[in-house]
């Protein structure tokens, strides 16, 4: 269903973005300018101390300069409440006192049916709670006391009991007017072997399962009979209940994590309840299955670094490694997992009852990063006393690293494993280079680097030699063009939003330029930037030689030519950074045992960088900067000693 634009506009008008965001953040009032609708706070999507999260009330957009989270009013509610667009609109409409527009017939029918199923689950929660308090629930109450749960905790988690009668819940719901087919569709009843229909949960302790918005969507049941075929039984997949996309105790855990509590992932319901009772309120558990990728992404929405609590046995360690394997290709920079390793034979509930909450806190403080768990697996029971074995070891390390999809994170893992490898194997003997493998022409002794090469006269005079990199110079051209031609900003705002600037002062200036009111007057924009008081002075940048010769500063140049200049600079930056990534990744592979394509990959990266440099010279660019860059690049190759990979004499 497409909502009318007029309805969405009215919703935005009634609810300023800062009002909605303000429930989740603490504003930095020193940096905030309320009169201009310019708000700053620590980001609610990742843990930080600085106010890098910006809300522009006038434009209705938010952006985090730390994790690059961005969007509008509806996206913020979607991300913080873990709901879809229509649900976010419904939440905001209810807050604003507005009635949702009529939906199409099919959508309305689906919504009505889901509400009927959820209402049935709510009725079941109350019925199960009532059965726990009656005589038939005495054994279940004794079990809860034996596990150390207080009546207050049982009430908080709405723990109930399904009695031994075959269809007690089903008859109760039918007596209240529920349709038998809806009872089955909600997962509360199931066909029996004799062809009749019976309750799904019989003689079980019941744990209601709610989604992130607090709606009852299913149940988990623990058998009271020790001889039952299944110790735990969950609701089946229904229109409400998707096991792989929900977590037990998600709503309360998200609220606690928002207050700074560590997000803990335990194995089962009782572990979560015991942790919460002991003060670890941001605890969740998967719903009777192994953790799924959707659940991982849900965890990272709540906290950038969840803690996985592993049972202290071999099965618990294997479960942790399965989670690590699942997380490796899905993780991005800023996301992580850490693992709490419990003593042998204990789960969180056992440990807290035996040793108290302080013992579990100590384990949290000693939680190990995921890289450590993966390293222990790849090195376990491994003997590395022969070249063939070390080569196989390096092959396995490279295969593991290649599973990481995020480039920045992949480089970090390569660095970490290279360091661990060196600590494990010790310093390796130097290899000499001779014969046809010598990378440099000459005779006599094998080539060895003798220290840094002296810079050429042109390199000494270049802008890069005085602290300016080619990337920074191109960024200065972009920023100066925006300041001198502010009419271009609206058309480039989406392109530059989240651009990775090479220097902090460039990032600060870019944020201020993009957040400034739309204008075609350069003087008005510069005054706005000056009045902010938190942006670097423009005059030093505008006076740089490579900035003064840009099209934006030339008399008679139109905005179209200035826009082409910005596009050209962005393309060159992308090409240079892509080549740099390839070079770094090639060297990382080399550090982990060698790569037969290293020389080709370095040459290909250099070719792409040279193409950018040639384009700059052909168009009157700073040749000195490119000369100095080539000299610096050669020096990096010498410093890394990449040629020592060649065969020995």
Image: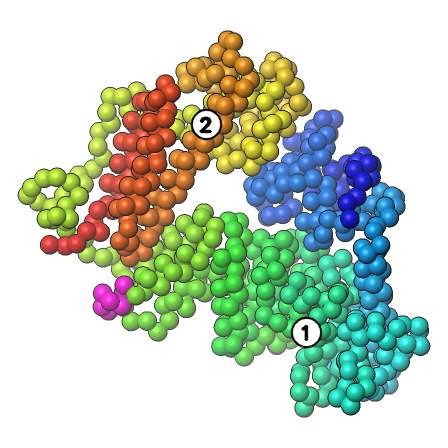
- Residue drawn at x 30%, y 27% is 628
Magenta span: predominant SS is helix
Q: Which percent across, then down, holds residue 476?
A: 47, 24
How crowded pointer 1 is (Cα within 10 Å; few <14, some 14-19, many 20+) is rated as some
Q: Residues within 10 Å of mark 2 (few under 14, many from 20)?
A: many
Rendering coords of residue 522 (x, y %): 60, 15
Q: Position of residue 49 (x, y in %)?
A: 59, 43
Going 24% across and 21% down the picture, which residue do you hit? 457
State the SS at label 2. Answer: helix
The circle drawn on residue 316 is none
The figure's colour scheme reads rainbow
387 is within the stretch colored magenta: yes
Q: Quadrant of residue 605?
A: top left
Q: Separation of disc 1 and disc 2 at Cα?
A: 58 Å
Q: Give the range drawn in magenta.
A: 385-391
Q: Answer yes or no: do the residues labelled 1 and 2 have beta carbons within 8 Å?
A: no
Residue at disc 1, secondary structure: helix
Q: Name the residue under label 1.
A: 270
Q: Residue drawn 75% across and 88% down?
A: 193
Q: Can residue 134 be seen in this view?
A: yes
Q: Foreground: 643 or 282?
A: 643
Mark 2, residue position: 569
Q: Which of 618 and 255 is in front in this view?
A: 618
Q: Which residue is drawn at 86% across and 85% down?
A: 135
Residue 262 in view in this figure = no
Earlier sequence position, callout 1 versus callout 2: 1
State whether residue 326 is above or below residue 96. below
Q: Left or right of 105: which side holds 582?
A: left
Judged from this view, the residue extending furthest toward the left is 444
- The reply to whether the magenta stretch includes residue 88 is no
**Image height of 201 relative to 28, above or below:** below
């Amino acid at each position: 269903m497409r909502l009318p634009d007029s309805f969405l506009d009215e919703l935005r008008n009634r609810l300023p973005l800062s009002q909605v965001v303000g429930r989740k953040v603490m504003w930095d009032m020193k940096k905030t300018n309320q009169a201009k609708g310019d708000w700053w706070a620590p980001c609610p999507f990742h843990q930080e101390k600085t106010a890098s999260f910006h809300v522009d009330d006038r434009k209705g957009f938010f952006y985090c300069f730390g994790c690059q989270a961005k969007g509008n009013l509806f996206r913020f509610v979607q991300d913080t409440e873990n709901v879809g667009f229509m649900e976010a609109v419904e939440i905001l409409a209810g807050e604003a006192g507005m009635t949702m527009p009529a939906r199409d017939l099919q959508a309305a029918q689906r919504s009505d049916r889901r509400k009927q199923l959820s209402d049935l689950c709510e009725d079941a929660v109350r019925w199960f709670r009532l059965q726990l308090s009656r005589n038939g629930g005495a054994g279940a109450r004794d079990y809860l006391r034996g596990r150390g749960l207080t009546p207050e905790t049982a009430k908080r988690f709405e723990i109930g009991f399904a009695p031994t009668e075959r269809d007690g819940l089903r008859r109760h719901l039918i007596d209240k007017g529920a349709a038998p087919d809806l009872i089955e569709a909600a997962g509360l009843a199931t066909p029996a072997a004799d062809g009749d229909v019976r309750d799904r949960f019989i003689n079980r302790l019941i744990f209601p399962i709610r989604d992130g918005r607090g709606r009852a969507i299913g149940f988990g049941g623990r058998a009271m009979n020790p001889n039952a075929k299944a110790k735990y039984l969950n609701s089946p997949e229904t229109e409400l209940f998707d096991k792989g996309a929900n977590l037990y105790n998600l709503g309360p855990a998200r609220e606690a994590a928002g207050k700074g509590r560590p997000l803990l992932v335990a194995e089962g319901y009782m572990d979560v309840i015991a942790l919460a009772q002991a003060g670890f309120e941001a605890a969740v558990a998967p719903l009777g299955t192994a953790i799924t990728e959707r659940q991982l992404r849900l965890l990272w929405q709540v906290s950038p670094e969840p803690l996985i609590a592993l049972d202290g046995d071999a099965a618990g360690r294997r479960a942790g490694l399965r989670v690590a394997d699942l997380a490796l290709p899905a993780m991005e920079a800023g996301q992580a997992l850490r693992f709490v390793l419990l003593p042998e034979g204990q789960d969180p509930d056992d440990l807290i009852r035996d040793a108290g909450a302080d013992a579990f806190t100590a384990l949290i403080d000693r939680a190990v990063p995921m890289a450590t768990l993966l390293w222990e697996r790849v090195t376990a029971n491994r003997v590395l006393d022969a070249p063939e074995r070390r080569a196989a070891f390096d092959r396995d390390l490279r295969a593991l690293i290649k599973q990481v999809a995020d480039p920045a994170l992949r480089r970090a893992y390569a660095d970490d494993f290279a360091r661990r490898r060196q600590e494990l194997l010790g310093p390796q003997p130097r290899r000499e280079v001779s014969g046809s493998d010598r990378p440099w022409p000459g005779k006599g002794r094998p080539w060895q680097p003798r220290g840094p090469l002296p810079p050429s006269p042109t390199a000494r005079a270049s802008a890069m030699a005085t602290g300016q990199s080619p990337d920074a110079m191109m960024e200065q051209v972009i920023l100066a063009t925006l300041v001198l031609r502010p009419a271009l900003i609206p058309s480039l705002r989406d392109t530059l939003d989240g651009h990775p600037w090479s220097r902090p002062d460039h990032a600060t200036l870019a944020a201020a330029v993009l957040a400034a009111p739309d204008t075609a007057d350069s003087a008005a924009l510069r005054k706005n930037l000056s009045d902010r008081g938190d942006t670097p002075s423009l005059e030093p940048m505008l006076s740089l030689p490579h900035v003064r010769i840009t099209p934006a500063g030339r008399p008679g140049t139109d905005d179209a030519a200035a826009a082409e200049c910005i596009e050209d600079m962005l393309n060159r930056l992308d090409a240079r950074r892509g080549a740099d990534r390839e070079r770094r990744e090639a060297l990382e592979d080399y550090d982990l045992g060698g790569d037969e394509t290293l020389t080709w990959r370095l040459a290909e990266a250099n070719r792409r960088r040279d193409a950018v440099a040639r384009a700059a010279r052909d168009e009157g660019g700073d040749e000195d900067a490119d000369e100095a860059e080539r000299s610096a690049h050669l020096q990096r190759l010498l410093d890394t000693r990449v040629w020592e990979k060649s065969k020995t004499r």
